Image: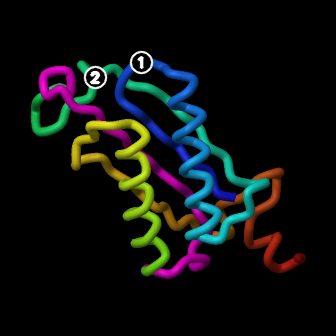
Amino acid sequence: MPHINLQISGQPNAELTRRSSAAVAEITQRVLGKKPEVIVVSVQYQPHESWIIGGVPLSEQGRNAFHLDISVTDETNTKAEKAQFLKEVFETLSGVIGNVHPVSYIYVIDARAAAYGYGGLTQEYRHQHG
């Protein structure tokens, strides 16, 4: 695991989806130590006129933005690893997307192992029976 939800301002773009999801997956594997075979990335697009920062739509600011949520099992990453992840994701997606507004959020969600999992099993179950 983890599961990553990435929202990008603009219209759907297959090449941008491919490049951004690959970049985020690579950083997730390298910095957070997650196994590539269980990294899931979902990408959605939001029109610039519907993305409002500071009361002004991106369409009027001439900027792009993104929002990334990543769910990881609580206590599997240090504060330093999460800080490095935020730094690298922001830098990388800024380069991939281009002209990114600094108010583009990244949220590492520390999900409790007993309340999070895949394949019908919690991460707590995997830990106890692994």
Q: Is residue 79 left or right of residue 120?
A: left
Badge 2: residue crowd in 10 Å (few <14, some 14–19, many ≥20): many
Q: Is residue 22 left or right of residue 94?
A: right
| Secondary-structure class at tag 2 | helix
- Placement of the N terminus among the 4 image quadrants: bottom right
Q: Which residue is mark 2?
A: 48
- Placement of the C terminus among the 4 image quadrants: bottom right
Q: Nearer the viewer, residue 75 or 78?
A: 78
Q: Give the vertical position of 31 relative to 13 (above or below).
A: below
Q: Which residue is mark 1?
A: 11
Q: Which residues are magenta?
A: 58-79
Magenta span includes 64: yes
Coloring scheme used: rainbow
Q: Is residue 63 left or right of residue 120?
A: left
Badge 1: residue crowd in 10 Å (few <14, some 14–19, many ≥20): few
Residue 11: horizontal and vertical position, in percent? 41, 18
Magenta span includes 12: no
Q: Give the vertical position of 29 relative to 106 (above or below).
A: below
Considering every residue shown, the one lying at the far left of the view is 55
Residue type at tag 2: His
